[in-house]
Image: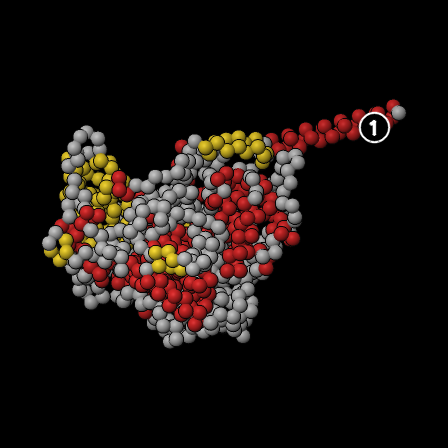
Amino acid sequence: MSLVIAYMSTISLLMLLGWWLVSWLLLRSGAKWTTKNRKITDECHLGHTTKYPLITMDSEQKQVLDMLQRPFRLPTQRESHPIVFEVGTRVGGSEPPPQRLTLARSIPRGTVFSIFVKSHRLAAKELCDYFMEASSVQELRQRVEEVRGLVNEKLFIFALSFVIIRKPEMRHLRLPSIVEIFPCMFVPVTTVSEMEQEARKSTPDQEIVVTEYGPEFSSTHLKPEHRVAYWREDYGINSHHWHWHLVYPVDLGVMRDRKGELFFYMHQQMLARYDMDRLSVGLNRVQKLSNWRIPIPDGYFPKLTINNAGQTWGSRQDNSLVQDYRREDFGLLPFDVSELEQWHSRIMDAIHQGYLVDHDGNQTRLTDNVKPPEKRGIDLLGDTVEADSSISLNSLFYGDLHNMGHVVISAIHDPDYAHRENLGVMSDTATAMRDPVFYRWHKYIDDIFQEYKVIQPPYTTEELSLSSVEVVSVAVESQGQKNQLITGWSTRDFEASRGLDFNADKPVMVRLTHLNHHPFVYSIKLQAANSGSLPKEVTVRIFMAPKLNERGVEMSFMEQRLLWAEMDRFTHDLKPGLNHILRSSTSSSITNSNEFTFRDLEERPNPDNPGAPENTLFNFCGCGWPQHMLLPRGKQEGMPFELFVMVTDWNQDKVAQPDGACSCSAAASFCGILDALYPDARPMGFPFDRRPMPMLLNRPVGRASDLTRLSNIAMQDITITFTNAQITQ
């Protein structure tokens, strides 16, 4: 017995020494065990307390970055850092993932994942729901490792990103740029090959940089559409489109305020900006793709890869014809183009009859002159056209027009899968805007909305005016010049090796060239006649549009109406008398001024305390138009534009927000506010979303400048000059 006791004592002593040694090594390596019980104080959850009782060795932000890196890799070995869970925690649900995720596993790895396809949306919802069950980042990481290698890579990133954005306890975390997660969706295959070669021949400790001139790889100037390739293939624009559809997904049970109306408005604004750049390079405005029985003149060869193995996207030849869909590789039943035409006819009937018919045969009127909580007609119409089957009043009758158009167009080159070609870039939100046909398709979609908008009654003088405020003057100032804005080229470096495996032990960088502009400031002088000492809060709305059409002729109100691009929208407290507002272009309500890379987030000053003052830069929600594309290109000889400033009464514009609403509102005009109501009671696009009144103050309205008869509206001619030179920030 004494020998047994001595033996057990020795074993206990050795275990104690082993535990002490492990702890000492952990301390020596700099790892810290921390129990998290903190307040989330970022701009989404000020004052809300969320507890994190689980123990982890890495910051939660780092764990998220680890999950997002190299999505094409297989889980061949466990992570280098262990994951520690509370005793008794059951991870993975009541059934293991292979039994639960039947839809999510139905999309093969290395193939196209498309949110435009109903079966893919259902697969995404299944995986999102599974990830949403995680109560912490550590549990999410465990679930991620369980399914990695079982599901499609792009579906995996979509679901993981969706959960990080939507779960309240993860709102302090940030997503890195989608460019670094999937560089093959932004960089041509030739540049990827060049990076691989450079990685093999690089010297130790060398950071590899490969220059890639974004606008130059898809085609040549033999094709007129190539003149706007710098715009269509801009990484920021395509990132924005991917992120917007992540924030406003279809069929995922996300019921965001005015979702249908924002679908209309955001895409209409993209078209306005695209047309401004087309005019900048001597092209006509985009024509809608309304006749599907004639060939599409312009082809598109993306030269991008779908996955790490080098599979390419499908290409469309010039003069291709939209054909009936007969593929069996994508989870879709056969589909006829005539169904699109039938859905179109039913929606147009609803617009002109003034009502939609729901599943039970009840009529819901279509009008924008409503009071909350009744939905505006444009909101109902957006839900119908996009179309979210959980929100559309009658998806079986009115169909899936927008989404199926994307799918059918993306299969033009191989509609029956006879050549086993992948779908084209129109099938993915991160690549669709590269293709010229995207804008023709969305011009057609927007034309449906405009058919509805032009039959709405014009705004009255009372709705447009604010007699107590006079806009005295408007100007923009940049680089010491007044009303002269300058554009040119800039570059941005991304670490492609975060998303692709170059078999290198050092970073592999790609440098993308993009349009940019010198920052500028709006200088607005207002005269306020409000009485009393209290300030009057107002909304300042700023729009910009080209002054001349393709023929060099000044445009009428109706011709120019769809070219007005929203530049900014903000509130301001007016004092009696003269007020001088200086507003920086970098504060725009449509833009996302910061797109973070993996390195940015790894070097975040205080990742375990998101509310720390030094983290102010990181406190944003990620959605928004790219800041570097705020201005159109303009012309080298200078191009005339008009700046439109309108001041409205905040008491009529404001929206009563729910208690505890998230205030992620840096790009509210295009992205709304997370978990809150859209922060403007007016129709989106006001005052240009409707046709003008025939007469204003007893005189006809022919041009937008006629609205300046009202004291709260002013316009200013400005010039945008493209230097074709480097813009340094």
Q: Is residue 697 visible?
A: yes
Query: Quarter holding the N terminus?
Result: top right
Front position in the image: 468 or 496: 468
Please report the residue visible at 56 percent of the width from the left and 40 percent of the height from the top.
Answer: 135
Residue at far top of view = 2
* Direction from residue 222 to residue 38 in the image, left or right: right
Q: How many marks?
A: 1
Residue 344 image position (x, y, % from top left): 38, 66
Residue at far right of view = 1
Residue 529 image position (x, y, % from top left): 15, 37
Residue 465 image position (x, y, % from top left): 18, 46
Figure colour scheme: secondary structure
Please report the residue visible at 43 percent of the width from the left and 60 percent of the height from the top.
Answer: 361
Q: Residues within 10 Å of mark 1 (few under 14, many from 20)?
A: few
Of helix, strand and loop, which one carries label 1?
Answer: helix
Three-letter amino acid code of the residue under disc 1: Tyr
Work out whether 230 lies above or below 88.
below
According to the picture, the residue beneath numbered tag 1 turns out to be 7
Work out whether 111 lies above or below 74.
below
Front position in the image: 243 or 699: 699
Work out whether 520 lies above or below 52.
below
Residue 583 image position (x, y, % from top left): 25, 42
Quarter of the view holding residue 227:
bottom left
Please report the residue visible at 20 percent of the width from the left and 67 percent of the height from the top.
Answer: 551
Q: Is residue 631 visible?
A: no
Please report the residue visible at 49 percent of the width from the left and 66 percent of the height from the top.
Answer: 423
Quarter of the view holding residue 123:
bottom right
Front position in the image: 96 or 602: 96
